[in-house]
Amino acid sequence: MNADSISGARKHCADAPEIADYLADAETFSTWIAHYLSGSLDQMPVTPRVRPGALAAALDVVLPDEGAPLRELFAEFVRDLLPGVTQWNHPGFFGYFPSSAGPPGVLGEYLTAALNQQAMLWRSSPMASEVEARALDWLRGLLGLPAAYTGVAYDGGSMANLHGLLAARQVVVAGVRTWGLTCARDIAGYRVYASAQAHSSITKAVIVLGLGEHALCSVSCDRDGRLDVEALREAIATDRTRGLLPIAVVATAGTTSCGALDPLADIAALCREQGIWLHVDAAWAGAAAMLPECAPLFFGIEQADSVVVDPHKWLFTPIDLGVCYFRNLAPLTDALALQPAYLRHAEDEAELNLMDRGIALGRRCRGLKLWFVLKHYGADGLRARLREHLRLARLFADAVDSHPYLQRVTAVGFSLVCFRAVLADLADDRTDVLNRAMLNAINDRGAVFLSATEVNGRFVLRCAIGHLRTGEAHVALVVQEIDEVLAVLLEHGAP
Ligand code: PLP
């Protein structure tokens, strides 16, 4: 729609009062969103000040019979619901892995919702099928994956991991589609190998695939949280002698706890030698592969059979979007393709029917928002933002290293720093108590938000940098918050 057609639409609205109302509502929403995303939310606490259930208590228990105008509901939203929002779009959000939704992605979602496309068949939305394919192909190129890979959009890393492993199972367990796992009576069991630091979605995938949780072989890691390749080799050898059949090896590029990068090239070589499917979970850190200075760290990823990267983590795309790249799509479609009569489509090979690439039939159009994000920032803009996050993480790590009471627990993992407060003569379990109290106090104050994990059995804080608007001042604020909270805790003789 060009400027003329927008003014035509305005005139049409003026002639049709019910549309004019929606236009006013849309303007209210958009104005609020524009202010929110460009900084009004910075005045709000990052984490809400609500107790469990308090929000629900403010909501109607019974749905009113009569509908209400959107402007009234908007006021209710601001009054009753907004106080319960954890501000993922706040530049002081350093918890988990930040998901930073900037204007291009949010506005892309706005159009996506308005268009309400069902991306199951090419016929059901040529735009959704083709924009997804093109945007995922751009992303593939940015990440340095060879052109042979085809990306498939899912709702996040967990589903993307599940589909990668589903394709692996299809290759190894011949007949599984028809007969289930019982088809291989001579097999003692199956194995999926992943490091002890792999994300819990790998365990879930193993459960969902019917392999049983015990099929997941948790391989030990070195001190930096990287999978020990010799331990992997030994585990595979031992399992083979016991009649257990490997389904896949999962390598993690950027572990959730500490951002560690498994030795991809060595793992890839072992998988090639053993003829085992290699799945790389690069859900968060994969984005960094687009930086020439980081690309060598990912060497070996181009040998994987499937690779997961989540644009909704470190690529400024609103939740939800996780992608699995498949070197060869056939095992996935062999596992899942079905054509019930009501979905049979024209036999035109050029039609891209995405329903055969996932468990769900109904698919959101996730490609459009990514298209907006990638085109708006451009490759250079994305790289500059990621590079800035890496720089800020190093700044924060330096502040930790030079702090009298803080200690870094692992190497900086891309833009993630793991640390804890350590006091002379304080036993490990009391140190855990101190750090837990410190985390709770920092998060209760609401200026910044951090999360936690365990490293070698000890409670550790995580500062993950990934927000579009996070700058040096926000990183300095984390240090200031730590200092102020520690001062109070120490004054009270804690723990
Ligand atoms: N893989 C890794 C390495 C992760 O860190 C996460 C989540 O943090 C996931 C997979 C799961 O992603 P999602 O929450 O999008 O399902």
Image (cartoon, helix red, strand yellow):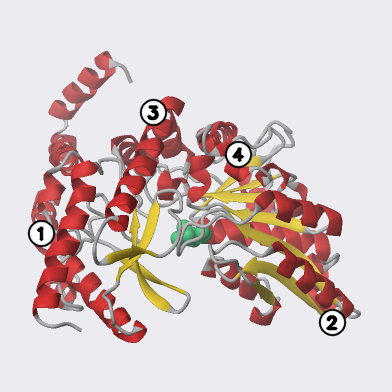
Sequence-wise first label, 1 or 4: 1
Q: Which residue is mark 1?
A: 76
Quadrant assignment for the C terminus:
bottom left
Q: Is mark 3 within 8 Å of ligand 1?
A: no
Sequence-wise first label, 1 or 2: 1
Sequence-wise first label, 4 or 3: 4
Give, as a three-letter code, the residue at label 2: Ala
What is the distance, in whole Å, between disc 1 and disc 4 at their CAs?
Answer: 51 Å
Q: Where does the image place residue 115, in percent across and percent down from the top left?
A: 39, 39
Residue 274 left/right relative to 92: right
Quadrant assignment for the N terminus:
top left
Q: Is disc 2 placed on a helix, strand or loop?
A: loop
Label 1–label 3 contact, CB within 8 A: no
Q: Which residue is mark 3?
A: 381
Which label belongs to residue 188? 2
Residue 49 quadrant: bottom left
What is the distance, in whole Å, between disc 3 and disc 2 at their CAs?
Answer: 51 Å
What is the distance, in whole Å, between disc 1 and disc 2 at their CAs?
Answer: 59 Å
Residue 167 left/right relative to 154: right
Q: Where does the image place residue 292, in percent across and percent down from the top left?
A: 53, 32
Q: Is mark 1 within 8 Å of ligand 1?
A: no
Between 217 and 2, the one lying in front of the other is 217
Give, as a three-letter code, the residue at label 3: Gly
Residue 63 left/right relative to 363: left
What is the distance, in whole Å, between disc 1 and disc 3 at their CAs?
Answer: 37 Å
Q: Which residue is mark 4?
A: 296
**Local crowd at mark 3 within 10 Å, few (<14), some, or many (≥20)?**
few
In the image, which is nearer the foreground, mark 1 or mark 3?
3
Between 23 and 233, the one lying in front of the other is 233
In the image, which is nearer the foreground, mark 1 or mark 4?
4
